[in-house]
Amino acid sequence: MGRAGLVRGYQHVCRRKGCGHEEQVEDAKLRLCPSCKMKLWPKALPRPLRFHDLRGTTATLLARAGVSLVVAQRMLRHADPRLTANVYTRVDLADLRAGVARVPPLVPTVSPRPESAKNEGRTPSESRSKSGHCIGRGDRI
């Protein structure tokens, strides 16, 4: 739990024999013992967690993976999919940003110029000769 960051703080303990200094802080930064100047060893104080709390984690991970709500409801054995969606599925800022990124842009994209605009300033025979479809005066269709 300490490596995952699911902690409520850290207990820093001096391991020098006979010192016994302890202090509880929120971070695991390096600290020195005020009495003997030795390094204090941080020990993670895990956040209280029940097995039931994993249901919310499971529902959230299923929703992020794109699993349909009905499938998640059946996996969690809920009677109503609204319970799964409203109570157990959690949305954070990254989920909201991903949802906004899926919305197509409202401003139309600029399309390339039409073929007629590319041939401006050329005579019709020059335009056709470049494409290989030149028909001379004596040619019949």
Image (tube, rainbow, N blue to C red):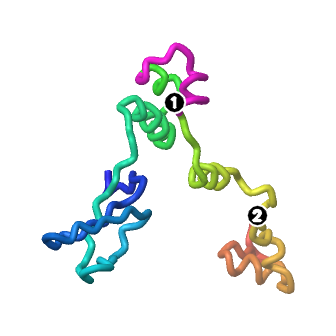
**Quadrant where the C terminus lies?**
bottom right
Give how far across and how far down residue 64 sits, in percent. Answer: 50, 43
Point out which mark residue 109 bears. Answer: 2
Mark 2 residue element: loop
Q: Is residue 32 visible?
A: no
User: Which stretch appears magenta?
Assistant: 75-88
Q: Is residue 10 visible?
A: yes
Q: Residues within 10 Å of mark 1 (few under 14, many from 20)?
A: few
Q: Is residue 106 above or below residue 78?
A: below
- Residue 116 occupies quadrant: bottom right
- Residue 90 occupies quadrant: top right
Looking at the rendered structure, the number of numbered marks drawn on it comes to: 2
The residue sitting at 53% across, 28% down in the picture is 69
Give how far across and how far down residue 109 sits, in percent. Answer: 76, 64
Looking at the picture, tell me which residue is in the foreground, 89 or 37: 37
Amino acid type of the residue that numbered disc 2 sits on in the rendered structure: Thr
Give how far across and how far down residue 8 sits, in percent. Answer: 42, 53
Looking at the picture, tell me which residue is in the foreground, 116 or 63: 63
Q: Earlier in the sequence, mark 2 or mark 1?
A: 1
The residue furthest bottom is: 121
Q: Which one is in front in this view, the residue at disc 2 or the one at disc 1?
A: 1
The residue sitting at 49% across, 39% down in the picture is 60
Amino acid type of the residue that numbered disc 1 sits on in the rendered structure: Ser
Looking at the picture, tell me which residue is in the foreground, 37 or 31: 37
Q: Is residue 116 above or below residue 56?
A: below
The residue sitting at 38% across, 39% down in the picture is 49
Point out which mark residue 68 bears. Answer: 1
Whether residues under marks 2 and 1 lie with C-beta atoms below 8 angstroms apart, the answer is no
